[in-house]
Amino acid sequence: MTMQPTDSNGAAISMMVDDVSVVYRVNTEAKLSMGALIKSGFSGRSPDKIQAVKKVSLSIHEGESLGIVGNNGSGKSTLLRVMAGLLPPTVGQVYANSEPMLLGVAAALRPGLSGRRNIEVGLLALAIHPDRVEGLIEEVADFADIGRAINRPLGTYSSGMRARVHFAIATTVRPRILMIDEALGVGDKHFKSKSYARIDELREHAGTIVFVSHSNAEIERVCNRVIWLNEGVILADGPTKEVLDEYAAS
Amino acid sequence: MTKTNDQMPSGLQPLHAMPPLRKYVDQLWQRRTYAIRMPLRELRARNMNNVLGLSWFLLNPMLLVAVYYTFFGLIIGTDRGVDNFLTFLASGVFTYSFLQRTMTSASRTVVTNVGLIRAIRFPRALLPITETVEQSLAHIPVVAVLFLVALLTGEPVRLSWVLMMPLVMLQASFALGVGFILARITTNFRDLQNFMPFGFRLVFYMSGVLYSIDAFVADVTIRRLFFLNPFFDNIKLVRFAILGGEFPAWAALGTVISAVVMLPVGFTIFRRGEPYGRA
């Protein structure tokens, strides 16, 4: 038998964030004068560094739903992407006991392809077995409610329709570690309630959830633990109610 | 300091690391259907908004060879020492552009698909591979045009035409290998994309696309140096397959070696660049 890493309560650790820092390198426009040009080696730019996440370490256990709160630009989404294994950190590492999946708004859809083909290719990109894909296409299209538009190029869809297609594709997979970035409810009122139900289904299946949101109500509904991130540093970490109160008082 | 793998409690795997070769290849194999279907759908949709639609896959190579023939065949006259210059030219131009286009577009895949990279986890080598499959599929009608040009210029149907199938696969393998390396360099050094057109231009002139080196290069030693260029070898071998003549053993050797060596070398170099998508 292999040893499972556990905490004092006996629940296994499903994810460990180890000393993670993320530095964005950005090039800002340099002044277009002769002196500035020579100083920048004729590149016309001055490099700048933005530290989005600073030395963050934390462990998450099976059964935990972790919320991340903080102001705009506090590094929430960056940290979530690092935890989802999508953005390599500048320093540090993230360990997980199964493949995490991020449910975000950023899409990998192709405007030139029809709705049907986008669903097909999207499901294949999620490594769903090809034998299952054919059957799932109709199911996903039904859920996204695109009707006869399924054979039209995605570029002709309204932004709401596109968001629905993306959501329907992304929620086909049921990961053990689920990451959610904002915007739980997409589309109109009717679709919103449908998508909430779908998320609840995924949450029941997932052992671990990490959730970034600006809505305290949503965080309270979903999470039993919250971290408060400010300028890339964890200011507070604890039970949902306590941390949210502290955040609200700031 | 980050912990090394063997210090980690079992069950937890690092997310930001180069997976072991075996696992990496397994993950790629799982997604093989994507690598074939994505290009098929993409090619089918590509010319939807053009009046002539799918016929562009045939028209494009025809126009290309017509332009070259008008200038180099009729006006400049580089057709010295070649019997069927039009087919000779088409073989060279088509093969060269297939190699160049595949290398160029494969080298951009990591940079252009950063949205996909930041959305889904998969072995990133899938991107250059899928691009190469797409270019190879798009090359099939081009080969058909090449056969057509050969027939129209009075060439007989040769048994060696069936060689085109394995030859295109060898070309794709060579181009993907180079594309892997260029893609890795591009992620750290975008400027490479600005240098590439000049590099390819040089290769174009050194590959005897527009002229026969037997007729234009007198020195035997220099002529032998041309065989060190895989582009030249590939073109030479395609010309043999289409037009017949003496079997170019050195070109065949160069074609096979460049394909068999470049693919694993390029793949290894690319994989060592994982994880991609850095801030």
Image (spheres, rainbow, N blue to C red):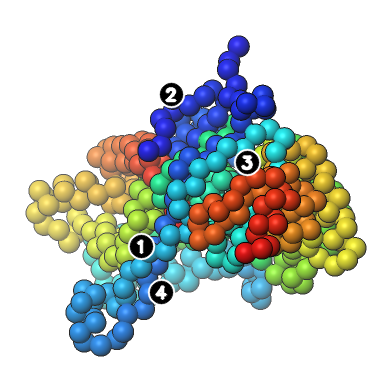
**Quadrant in the picture for residue B87:** bottom left
Number of callouts in the render? 4
Tell me the CA gap for discs 3 and 1. Answer: 30 Å
Mark linked to residue B67: 4
Q: Are marks 3 and 1 in contact (CB under 8 Å)?
A: no
Q: Report the mark closest to the observer, 4 or 3.
A: 3
**Quadrant in the picture for residue A116:** bottom right
Residue closer to the observer: A119 or A22: A22
Q: Amino acid at mark 4?
A: Val
Q: Are marks 4 and 1 in contact (CB under 8 Å)?
A: no
Tell me the CA gap for discs 3 and 2. Answer: 22 Å
The residue at 24%/82% (across/down) is: A36
The residue at 70%/55% (across/down) is: A244
Read off the chain for label 3. A
Q: Report the mark closest to the observer, 2 or 4.
A: 2
What is the x, y in percent for residue A229?
57, 56
Q: Are marks 3 and 2 in contact (CB under 8 Å)?
A: no
Q: Residue furthest top?
A: A1
> Are discs 4 and 1 located on one and the same chain?
yes
Q: Report the mark closest to the observer, 1 or 2.
A: 2
Residue that numbered label 1 is attached to: B190
Read off the chain for label 4. B
Residue that numbered label 3 is attached to: A100
Relative to B181, A83 lies left or right: right
